Amino acid sequence: MGEPENDSIQQLARLLKTSHNLIVFTGAGMSTESGITDYRSKGGLWHRFQPVTIQEFMESADKRREYWRYKKELYQEMKRAKPNAGHIALAQLEKSGFLAGVITQNIDGLHQIAGMPAQKVLELHGTNRLTVCLSCNAETGWEETLERLKKGEDIPLCLACGGLLKPATISFGQDLDSGVLTTASMWAQHCDLMLAVGSTLVVEPAASLPRIAKSHGAKLVIINLSETPLDASADLLIPEKSGTVLKHAVEILLGRSIE
């Protein structure tokens, strides 16, 4: 795919400039340019691994082995992944005072690595960068867990108490953190511009956030390669790769190159 249409980029830059409370909502497409595999597309994670529910994880050792095989592959992707042009552009927007916060469905932590302050990133589905014991709540870093998996442990257990370990992410059948979801809803209600980036906008309740923003008077920009259920409601629709779009728009806004 070629360069994004210049008119769309210019229009996005103007919207960014006039916004007083910008919130960005990001999905898996935000991180695919960093080498993180998405879930639902052909060749995505759910085409190669059967999703494991939280109940299955708790009750079945075989399901835990399957879960950790999938996590091992994802961890190895994370180890190679770097923030892409889109992550860097958003971090520069925040640093320059144009971005109030990011709400993300992603669990890779790339927004923070790019420079977004942690308190301005709401991780709806948790984070892969921490492993938590389900018995004693002890936390360890994901890289330590990856090393244990690479050495042959198929179901890593807590080194403190022997309890089950699990990444600090939301699994199928597990409720989202109510506090995080409430804050995300408040951000959506009070923003005057929301960018929905790299999300198919089908996974609820997260996908309702752009609807909430729109219903409270915000303008909505959707940047996504495939169609979404909210395309007809968007004030600006850019069916392009998010990294290039965001980089060009922010460079126009700031009047300088960003790397």
Image (spheres, rainbow, N blue to C red):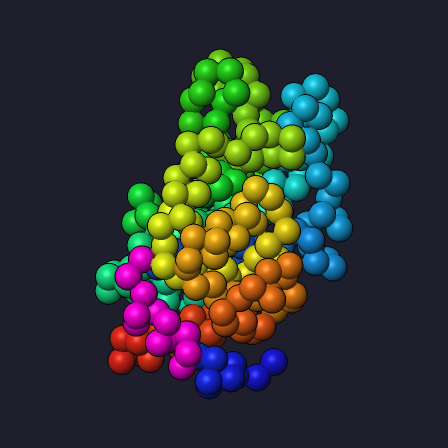
Between 147 and 178, the one lying in front of the other is 178
With respect to residue 4, does 16 lie above or below?
above
- Segment tinted magenta in the rendering: 10-21
Q: Is residue 11 in the magenta section?
A: yes
Residue 77 in sight: no
Residue positioned 54% across, 71% down in the render: 237
Query: Can you say whether 116 is above or below 61 in the image?
Result: below
Q: What is the quadrant of the C terminus in the image? A: bottom left
**How far across and how far down the image is residue 49, in percent?**
73, 44
Q: Quadrant of residue 228?
A: bottom right
Q: Position of residue 71 (x, y in %)?
A: 61, 40
Q: Tell me if 125 is positioned left or right of 87 in this view.
A: right
Task: Name the side, left or right, on which 259 lies relative to 52.
Answer: left
**Residue drawn at point x = 47 percent, y = 80 percent:** 8
In the depicted structure, whether residue 136 falls above or below residue 125: above
Q: Nearer the viewer, residue 25 or 40?
A: 25
Q: Residue shown at 24%/61% (left/top)?
A: 97
Q: Does the magenta portion include 140?
A: no
Q: Quadrant of the N terminus?
A: bottom right
Q: Main secondary structure of the magenta part?
A: helix
Residue 49 visible in this rendered orientation of the protein: yes
What residue appears at the point 50 percent right and 61 percent down from the top-left corner? 197
